[in-house]
Image: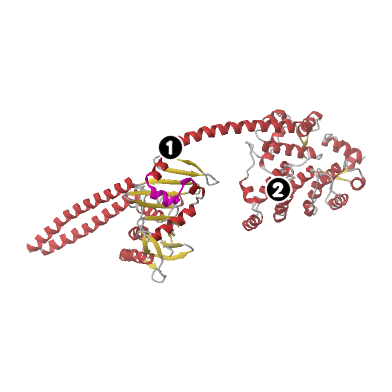
Amino acid sequence: MLRQFLTELEQRSPVDTLLSRYAFLFQVDNNNYIFSQQAFADLLDFIEKGSSSCQHVAAQAGAKWSGTNQKIALRNAIHKRGFVTPSCLWAYRYLRGNPQVLFEEFAPPEMCLMQIVLLKDAEPTKSIPFLIQRFLQRRETPQELKNASSLCLLSVLNSGVSAEQVRQLRSRYPGLDELYQWKPSMVTGNDECAPRDARASGDFHQLIRSIGNPKELSSLTRTVYLVSQFYVPLTLREWRRMFLDSTDGTFFRKLLPTGLMELTSGGLILSSEPAKRGMARKFLYESYAVAKDSIQRAQTARIKEEHQKRVRHKELDRQALEMLPDGIVCIDGSRLLFYMNPAAERLLHENHSLKELLFGKGSLENNLRKYSKERVLVQINARIQQSEDDIQIFGDHIVCKNGVKRFDVTLGPQVILIRDTTDQHLISREVGRLYRHEMKAALDVLQVGIETSRQLVKAGKEREGLEFLEQAEKKRAELYQMLEERIDFIRLHSDAFSIRPTEVNLSLVVERCVGNYRDLASARKVSIISNHLDHEPLRVSGEERFLMRAIDNILRNAVKFSRNNSQITVTLKCHETEALVLIEDEGPGIPPENLDKIFQLGFTTSGSGRGLYMARRIASAHGGRIDVTATVNKGATFIFRLPIRRG
């Protein structure tokens, strides 16, 4: 009778009907069916001695309806007989068998697919190397199994593998970096496999026609194949453990309204209707190849259309590049010149020394074949040491003067940008002169006030004259500082802004800035603690007055926002290739939503909204940056970073 039960189960008879017809084979415990002792003994004998053609059904039935005390015996019986079908492998692991069996080599592709599915829950440090060596690194492995292995690896890597384990695996298997970039196509829709009414409208053929690419087709095929492999109902949780990614789950959900699956008291299973089963069988063994060929043809047509669009867009991009006033030189991956816009041709033709500085003597095309950003920077550094040329280097950015002309050059791995900044430089210089004249005029006005105070003193009104003189002097100093800041702001705000670098002792800059604010801080009952006197001199390349301006602006804010009886700590230190100035206060801090805004021009809670903007512009012009961390009601820390001068 047990053989008859298994035979009808293999023939997809309705499971609920079978359980009621063969109730004498089972014991019912809390509505759960468990094989009776006699039936279970017959099942073990069938697994050990019966034909392998129905062994996969017997293994599934045993795993589904065995009791707690029966599972160990069943597991041993399956292991003793061997793993000849995917169901045996699944049942053995379902019964918590030794996971080491998953690391054996199986020849049939269907066994390999079940092996990959089950490896998703194995120990990552073992499963990842095995998947890579067994499937991904072997050329003869079918592409479908390689894709399934990649999905399994992604699932394992995203399921709680520690950062240290990932680092070790990446160092051992460089291909993992490429795997992280590989993303399977996802089907839109809810990924949850919620049960639906099996009578709901749906068309399996229409579902196949909706497939848009080979990866989606692979996912549907994998899902239908897994469904067709099981003769016992599985719960939603058990089905989810079989899916390699959310696309599998989405297609599982889409199978429900087609009627290809039905809901029983024990879970979900392939439909018992012959017509529905026939559709699944035909899709797997007949329609799959046709659908794959059709999708590939459609994909080829789409790629061709997208290529034509890219060609049209490239033509528009080329026309736009030819209209730019800035010179652009592009080099392909083989270091061959493939594009130079008219502006670049003109600039390099008219300024021969600029061409030699960037690319050397001889044929431009031959030199571009040897181009690399690092090589150009080495050449320019050698040129600077050997001559008096006016050249400045800030990272990948080069500022050079060629006669009366000035150029800004930005070097990229494959793109070089050349800008003629002569006009901007002249405009900036003239604006500076204008404001210096305005400052002189303002000072002349103050001089009149000073003369008035002198007359008052001569007239015997010394007290009035001295008070007037002190006010005038104070006003003159404020006006001078205001105009100086305004000039600096205009220079910094200009796109043509650049610094005139010299060697600067950052320790002295910090000392002067701290000295400028000790009295003001003391008046507000704030102490400033600094380690610059205890630190060895740190030398950077830059313009001292701007570095002072940047640190001054940050320190001024720290004093302004510090609470009474609090402390400001200024720390100077060296970290690898950078010099760091840390300014920590105990003020109100900065709300998280404002951390990215405080460096924007005009953003302020109290002030002009220019100080931190200028500080960041100065740091950027020196090849450095400013970082900030803050905690509300506990203070803020600004970190001014600059590259250390070498040599």
> What's the residue at 89%, 42% (across, down)?
25
Q: Amino acid at mark 2?
A: Leu
Residue at mark 2: 136
Look at the numbered discs 1 and 2 and tell me whether their residues touch, using CB distance below 8 Å: no
Question: Horizontal placement of 99 versus 451: left or right?
Answer: right
Q: Position of residue 48 (x, y in %)?
A: 90, 48
Question: Horizontal placement of 491 versus 642: left or right?
Answer: left
> What's the residue at 61%, 46% (across, down)?
181
Residue at mark 1: 322
In this view, 571 is above or below 128 = below
Q: Amino acid at mark 1?
A: Glu
What is the quadrant of residue 395 in the picture?
bottom left
Is 646 in front, or is 273? 646
How many angstroms separate mark 1 from mark 2 (CA)?
Answer: 46 Å
> What's the residue at 39%, 49% (across, down)?
354
Question: Horizontal placement of 280 versus 633: left or right?
Answer: right
In this view, 513 is above or below 306 = below
Q: Position of residue 386 (x, y in %)?
A: 40, 60
Q: Position of residue 180 (x, y in %)?
A: 62, 48
Kind of element beneath mark 2 = helix
What is the quadrant of residue 301 in the picture?
top right
Q: Quadrant of the C terminus?
A: bottom left
Is 490 in front, or is 581? 490
Predominant secondary structure, magenta span? helix
Q: Which residues are magenta?
A: 350-365
